[in-house]
Image (cartoon, rainbow, N blue to C red):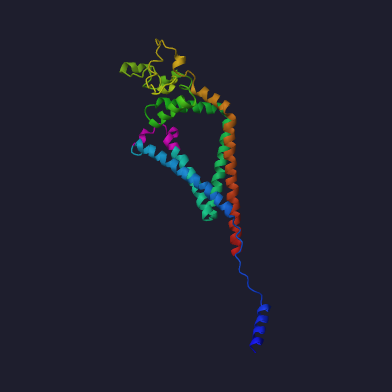
């Protein structure tokens, strides 16, 4: 009897197919998801750091309590850092959180932001190529504002010193005479006892061989009519406008390469975000 019951039990067990439990395959690519997440975490922190530096620079200048110190808002380096950092931070945030939380709304915002930024960059490049003379005029106008307010804003002062001394090795817009526009370097300031009158900033001076300590008085009196030194061996006589044009001509290929690389990264970001959104929608369709 016991043997009979065992045989019947085995027969019934064989007739009923065993239920197989398996996890449905997800439509969302983990590789794509965390690639977008990791890539945008970098930009998120970079944007936050850049914005923090800009805010710190404004705090050091006490700009928040004295907004009248903003002599030229569009050319204020601290404000530029804040704006660029804020845009980078927001784009990085939408991409990072959108990918991690699989939020289609944030991913759409991320893709649209990259598309708008890409269109603006392309438009700026095309317009810059077409209206080269206008760009030169705007650059000259901005540099002139830097010269006029050289002593008013430490950030602008550091920026123009870096451009003249380290980047382009130049002096003024067209030449050293452009520093006549600054009240401290104007030759008429001799009457009020300015030691910098008829001179140029130290960043216009050429570095001497084996110079360890920078001589900040090297540009004194170099624009005086009775100056008997050899200007070509002491200061840069080339204007920064012409130096900038020459630098662009020499480095056109690397600059174009960087711009193309940035555009490709943005296009890939848009495509990846759209692909991830499509995967999320496909996964949701399986649930319903």
| Residue 16 place in picture, x, y as percent | 66, 77
| Residue 193 place in picture, x, y as percent | 31, 18
Left or right for 212, reference 277: left
Q: Is residue 76 magenta?
A: yes
In-front residue for pair 185/41: 41
Left or right for 169, reference 256: left
Q: Residue at x 47, y 26 (%)?
A: 166
Q: Is residue 61 above or below residue 181?
A: below
Quadrant in the picture for the C terminus:
bottom right
Task: Residue 181: name its quadrant.
Answer: top left
Left or right for 238, reference 193: right
Q: Residue at x 58, y 32 (%)?
A: 254
Task: Residue 1: name its quadrant.
Answer: bottom right
| Residue 4 place in picture, x, y as percent | 66, 87
| Residue 149 place in picture, x, y as percent | 39, 27
In-front residue for pair 1/146: 1
Q: Residue furthest front?
A: 3
Task: Tell me the magenta residue range.
Answer: 66-80
Q: Is residue 193 magenta?
A: no
Q: Residue at x 51, y 50 (%)?
A: 96
């Amino acid at each position: 009897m016991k043997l009979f019951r065992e045989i019947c039990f085995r027969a019934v067990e064989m007739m009923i197919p065993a239920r197989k439990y398996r996890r449905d395959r997800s439509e969302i690519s983990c590789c794509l998801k965390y690639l977008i997440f990791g890539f945008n975490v970098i930009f998120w922190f970079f944007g936050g750091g850049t914005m923090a530096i800009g805010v710190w620079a404004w705090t050091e200048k006490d700009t928040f309590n004295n907004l009248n110190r903003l002599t030229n808002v569009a050319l204020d380096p601290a404000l530029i850092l804040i704006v660029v950092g804020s845009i980078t931070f927001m784009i990085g945030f939408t991409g990072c959180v959108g990918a991690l939380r699989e939020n289609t709304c944030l991913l759409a915002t991320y893709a649209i932001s990259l598309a708008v930024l890409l269109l603006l960059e392309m438009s700026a490049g095309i317009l810059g190529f077409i209206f080269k003379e206008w760009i030169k005029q705007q650059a000259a106008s901005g540099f002139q504002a830097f010269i006029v307010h050289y002593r008013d804003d430490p950030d602008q002062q550091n920026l123009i010193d870096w451009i003249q001394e380290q980047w382009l090795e130049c002096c003024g817009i067209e030449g050293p005479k452009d520093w006549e526009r600054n009240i401290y370097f104007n030759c008429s300031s001799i009457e009020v006892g300015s030691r910098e009158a008829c001179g140029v900033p130290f960043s216009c001076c050429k570095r001497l061989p084996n110079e360890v300590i920078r001589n900040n008085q090297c540009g004194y009196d170099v624009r005086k009519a009775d100056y008997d030194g050899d200007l070509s061996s002491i200061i840069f006589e080339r204007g920064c406008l012409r130096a900038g044009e020459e630098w662009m001509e020499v480095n056109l290929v690397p600059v174009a390469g960087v711009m193309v690389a940035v555009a490709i990264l943005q296009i890939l970001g848009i495509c990846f975000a759209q692909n991830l959104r499509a995967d999320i929608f496909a996964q949701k369709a399986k649930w319903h």
